[in-house]
Amino acid sequence: MITSAELAVARRALRQLWIGAVVWSIAFGGTIAASAISYVSTFPTEAERQQVAAATSGDAGLSVLLGPTTAIDTVGGYTVYKCFVFLTTIGAIWGLLAATKLLRGEEDAGRWQLVLSGSTRAGRATAATLAALFAAIGVLLVGTTAITLAAAQKPGVGFGTGETVLYGLSLMVAPAVFVMVGAVASQLCRTRRMASSWAMGVFGLCFLVRMVADASPDTRWLRWATPFGWTELVQPFTDNDAWPLLPALVTVVVLGALAVELSSRRDAGSSVFATRDVSDVRTFGLGSPLGLAVRLDLPILAAWCLGAGATGLAFGLIAKVATGAVPASLGDTLDRFGAEGSFVDQYFGVAFLLVATVVALIGAGQVGAASDEESSGRLVHLLAGPVRRATWFSGRLGLAAAGIVVAGLLAGLGAWAGAATQGAGLGLVELLGAGLNVVPTALVVLGLGAVVLAIAPRAAAAAVYAIVIGSLLVDLVASMVAGLAWTAHLSVFHFMALAPASTPEPATLGLTLLVAAGLLGAATLLFVRRDLAQG
């Protein structure tokens, strides 16, 4: 029986989620509506649509980068293709971050312990929080579906009510599954930062499996092994197959039950993978604030760097398949991203745009770690000794910057190693340069996050995620809809050359690095002038 305590937990959790869910539902629905209406106005005749289909349908390159290209000669098929990567990616990240925030994040802050001191138990409180998360997903579903149905009233769109609802349900697969991934990670890991990193690792693996699945007819069976594949297999507006929703439902139920069971079997504040109560003395990193930051964050930074390298390797491994038998007109599609040169160069140029998002997100983890160190009170103890605030802050930022540089290098090295096995014809220096090319933009993102950290530390990590994900959204929408091309200037990635497809200009790189340095310097000055935030 549900008690008033569980209802209170669920209501409080939903209050923290519903505004974000409404905002994302507008973004989801608006993206779908813009894609559908743009297709109807751009390709009004059947002949024009068949021409688009002949140029793109079944092409492995586009499938790997942007998702399914089947039935692209229909309004529904084209809309699914244009929106697939953005909506599933954003939905998954939003879901896992929301779950780790409301579960492990509340535990880190000590509020979860207060909840459990009342008339509820850990398992029931976790179940109530998961119920609130799914209520937020329900808000996302209703808003997305309603806006899509409104767009369907425009002549030529013609989406039916049933298939629109099925499309909405298919888009909820990623957030629903990754809410549960985040919930399980929150039980396994001791901090929210580590739980989010583990969940992001699962996200990256699932996304890479989907890419490999779409790279060749021989690997399409792998779509059944990833939540992104289940969304793709529904094929809304064409086949309208609801069966792929079944493994999603089973996965959600199993992971949800596992999260509830794990939470009921451990003490508040602990984790399944907890450190030992007694261990040998390890003095590494205890001699300076920077050394301590390295000691605490090196495993997570290493995981991010290896993830960037693995992403580059995956793009390299499928390069030959993705760029084989390319239609002559297909380059026009990638031209919209600003990629130039041969199709292999264009492919890697757009691929490194996606790598840039991974590298830029390293800043989110690091400013989040700095924020946690301040809000938990640990920073007060450091600064009570002979440690200057500017030294601690600049050391934290320097560690993040070093991680970004290493991640860029590993992404380039991984792409070269994968491409070399496929005979893609790109050299080591060229792809290392492409990896380093993403670094200045990632440093600008770090600088923006540092400024927020210096002003409002609790909002810093969220600000970085919003900047990176929002910029990726702007780039995708600007490339989809001709009338919105001007919005590309709002993206932090707009001024980044898509190397190796475009040669980076030294002046642009220098200016970007100068902006990053200015932001980091301004953030340091702002930080030393304000009081510490605690609790």
Image (cartoon, helix red, strand yellow):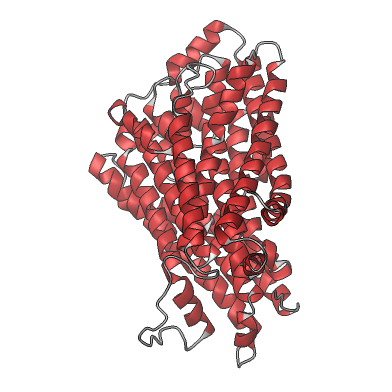
Question: Residue lying furthest right in this view?
Answer: 530
Image-based side of 343 in relation to 191, left or right: left
Q: Nearer the viewer, residue 105 or 490?
A: 105
Q: Is residue 398 or residue 256 the one in the foreground?
A: 256
Q: Position of residue 320 (x, y in %)?
A: 30, 35
Task: Report if residue 506 is visible in the image.
Answer: no
Q: Is residue 140 above or below residue 123?
A: above
Lateral position of residue 489 relative to residue 247, left or right = right
Q: How many marks?
A: 0
Q: Residue at x 47, y 67 (%)?
A: 271
Residue 473's place in the image compared with 231, above or below, is: below
Task: Tell me where residue 44 appears, x and y as whole percent.
Answer: 62, 10
Q: Residue at x 30, y 43 (%)?
A: 419
Does residue 307 lie above or below 271 as drawn? above
Would residue 217 be found to the left or right of residue 489 on screen? left
- Where on the picture, by quarter, is residue 299? bottom left
| Residue 254 position by quadrant | top left
Residue depicted at x 33% and y 52%: 414
- The C terminus, quarter of image: bottom right
Image location of residue 109, percent across then percent down: 63, 69
The residue lying furthest to the bottom in this view is 386
Q: Can the viewer see residue 75 in this picture?
A: yes
Q: Position of residue 213 (x, y in %)?
A: 35, 33
Q: Is residue 71 placed above or below 265 in the rendered structure?
A: above
